[in-house]
Amino acid sequence: MNKMLSVFAILVLLIGLPFAYAQSGDSQGGVVADQTETQDLGPASQKIIGDATTYLKEKLGTDYYNQYITFQSGESFMDCSVSGCVVRNEITFDYDIPFETAGNPSFGPGPRIQITLDDNGDIVRYEGPMKPYYFTISEDRAIELAKDYGLVDITDAGVASSVVGINGYEVVWVVSSNDILRYGEVANEPIYKGIYLDVDSGEVVGEYSINPMIQTPGGSGAVELGNFFEEDNFSIQDSENMNLWVIALIVLAVLIVCFVVYRVHKK
């Protein structure tokens, strides 16, 4: 009877520990205590749309707005949580980047502009260009500047927005190459060089290394300016691999304990 209880306890440990560890990891990964439920209230009011349009014209200029920006939609939502309910208005504009200048359309239709306002018409969040961009650097010129910077085997160039900040985003040329910077840690795959260029001045505003097995630039429309290295991606992957290793070690430890208990009881 004692042997059966021991074996049963060990089996419980064998099955339960990895599960408990995984659950613990999920909880540490950020269970939101104050979850929000959203209700669609339909189209935003003309006043709210007008407030967003006025803000955009004041920020970028009326002439710039008329040349590059077109109103797309305005939607209103009610976000409710245990803390209460607030109205959120999302006003979206098309940013009409001239692709005869901007280059490869595979990089998407260009950055969008979205302004979030509360029910009083106050700006809560701005996702748009930080300044007026006129896209004076052509695709050919961007490639020339990238070669001057040191890239040799250039493969692609396209326009993308940077990651949205508090005051909006920057718009840059993303120039990719087959120039190998180093080899990766996943499957010894090549890591390639690329740079970001200001779309008006042609100034190099950032450089990056990219692992095609993990990501590609441009498609999402949001790039991180400055020095961007794949170690950030590897750290995520390494963290996941570490979790698997810990679970495997737990299982191995339980199997060893099971074997020891079996030998003890056999004697």
Image: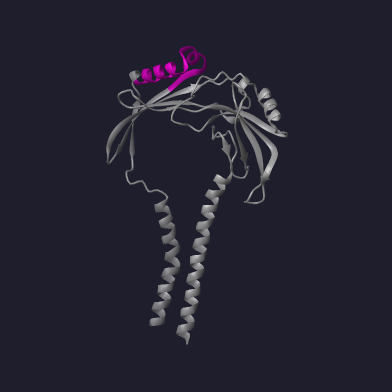
Residue extending farthest bottom: 267
Which residues are the magenta region?
A: 48-72
Q: Is residue 175 magenta?
A: no
Residue 99: percent from left, percent from top: 60, 22
In this view, the residue in front, 265 or 127, is 127
Against 193, is 132 above or below? above
Give the quadrant of residue 2.
Answer: bottom left
Residue 235: percent from left, percent from top: 54, 49
Residue 170: percent from left, percent from top: 52, 27
Q: How is the image coloured?
A: one colour
- Residue 206 placement, left or right of 140: left
In this view, the residue in front, 40 or 182, is 182
Q: Is residue 66 magenta?
A: yes
Give the quadrant of residue 53.
Answer: top left
Q: Residue at x 50, y 77 (%)?
A: 259
Against 31, is 79 above or below? above
Predominant secondary structure in magenta?
helix
- Residue 97 placement, left or right of 8: right
Q: Residue at x 45, y 68 (%)?
A: 14
- Residue 263 placement, left or right of 198: left
Q: Residue at x 35, y 21 (%)?
A: 48
Quarter of the figure that contains the N terminus: bottom left
Q: Residue at x 39, y 78 (%)?
A: 5
Residue 263: percent from left, percent from top: 49, 82
In this view, the residue in front, 253 or 196, is 196
Against 168, is 61 above or below? above
Residue extending farthest right: 152
> How many numbered circles does the render carry?
0
- Residue 13 placement, left or right of 80: right
